[in-house]
C-alpha cells in the first residue's frame, strides 16, 4: 500500500453546487446511471456511498460525473492478484471524461462522502483510548482532511494489537483477512474465520475498547474510512 498522511483543503467539486447542507443530488450524469457497466454500488446509506469501479484493458468508459468527493482506493497489483497492493488518495469528484480505450485494467473503490456540503466540526476531540493514541506503528493515519480520517490497521502473524477504541463512524474495508480473534472487556474472545474476498461494511457508532489477535500466517490488514462530525451549516462556496 502506498499511503501517506495528507491534510487536505476542501471545496465542492468544480461545476457542482449544493442547495444546502447534505443536499447534493446526483442526476442522470451520475457514474452509476451514465456508466453503469463500470460502476457498482456495494454499500449506501445516508452518510456514504461505496462504488466498485472496473474498466478492463482496451474497454470504453463513457463520460460521467462523481457528485460526491471521497476516498479513492486504486488497485495497483495485477488483475490476477486483486487488492494485493493499493494506492489511497482523496478524490475531489466532478465530471470525468471516461476512456475511449483504457490503457490498463482498472479496479477501484470509491468511498463517497455525502455531507461534504456541510461545515465540518473544527478540531473534534478524541478520547485517550482512540486508536491514534495507542502509538502502535501498525495503526497509521494514511489520509486525513476535514471530513475523513483513513486509518490503516495491520497486525503481523501471531501478534496482537494494543487495546483501543474507534471514535467515529466508518466504512470498514477488508480485502482479505487471516483467521483471528477479537478481545473485549466483556466475555471471552470471539473467533473470526479467514476471509478470502473483499468485504465492505459500515460501522455507525465507532467501536468500544477491543483488541484483535492475528491467528494466521499472513498480515491482518483493515482500513477504516472514518467520518468526522459535521455541523448542519452549509459550506459557503468561494467566490471566483
Image (tube, rainbow, N blue to C red):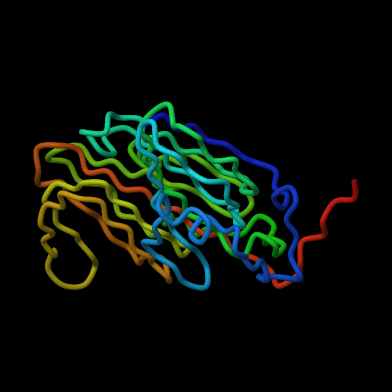
Q: Residue 154 is drawn in which quadrant? A: top left
Residue 173 lies, in percent from the top left, at 33, 52
Residue at horizontal 31%, vertical 32%?
85
Residue 164 lies, in percent from the top left, at 35, 55
Q: Quadrant of the N terminus?
A: top left
The answer to whether residue 117 is above or below residue 150 is: below
Residue 83 lies, in percent from the top left, at 29, 39
Residue 23 lies, in percent from the top left, at 68, 71
Badge count: 0
Q: Residue 237 is drawn in which quadrant? A: bottom right
Residue at horizontal 40%, vertical 53%?
37
Q: Residue furthest top?
A: 103
Is 146 in front, or is 209? 146
The answer to whether residue 82 is above or below residue 198 is: above
Residue 8 horizontal side relative to residue 72, left or right: right
Is 164 in front, or is 101? 101
Q: Residue furthest right?
A: 240
Residue at horizontal 65%, vertical 59%?
116
Residue 93 horizontal side relative to residue 202, left or right: right
Residue at horizontal 41%, vertical 48%?
53
The answer to whether residue 58 is above or below residue 136 is: above
Amino acid at each position: 500500500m502506498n499511503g501517506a498522511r495528507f491534510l487536505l483543503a476542501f471545496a465542492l467539486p468544480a461545476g457542482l453546487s449544493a442547495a444546502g447542507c447534505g443536499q447534493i443530488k446526483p442526476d442522470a450524469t451520475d457514474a452509476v446511471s451514465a456508466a453503469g457497466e463500470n460502476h457498482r454500488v456495494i454499500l449506501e446509506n445516508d452518510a456514504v456511498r461505496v462504488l466498485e469501479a472496473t474498466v478492463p484493458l482496451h474497454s470504453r468508459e463513457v463520460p460521467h460525473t462523481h457528485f460526491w468527493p471521497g476516498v479513492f482506493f486504486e488497485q495497483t497489483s495485477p488483475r490476477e492478484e486483486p487488492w494485493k497492493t493499493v494506492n489511497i488518495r482523496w478524490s475531489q469528484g466532478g465530471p470525468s471524461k471516461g476512456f475511449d480505450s483504457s490503457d490498463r485494467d482498472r479496479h477501484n473503490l470509491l468511498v463517497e462522502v455525502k455531507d461534504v456540503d456541510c461545515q465540518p466540526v473544527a478540531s473534534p476531540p478524541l478520547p485517550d483510548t482512540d486508536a491514534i493514541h495507542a502509538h502502535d506503528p501498525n495503526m497509521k493515519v494514511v489520509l486525513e482532511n476535514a471530513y475523513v480520517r483513513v486509518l490503516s490497521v495491520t497486525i503481523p502473524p501471531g501478534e496482537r494489537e494494543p487495546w483501543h477504541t474507534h471514535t467515529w463512524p466508518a466504512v470498514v474495508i477488508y480485502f482479505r483477512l487471516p483467521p483471528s480473534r477479537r478481545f473485549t472487556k466483556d466475555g471471552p474472545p470471539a473467533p473470526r474465520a479467514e476471509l478470502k474476498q473483499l468485504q465492505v461494511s459500515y460501522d455507525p457508532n465507532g467501536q468500544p475498547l477491543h483488541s484483535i489477535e492475528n491467528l494466521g500466517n499472513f498480515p491482518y490488514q483493515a482500513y477504516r474510512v472514518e467520518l468526522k462530525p459535521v455541523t448542519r451549516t452549509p459550506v459557503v462556496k468561494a467566490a471566483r
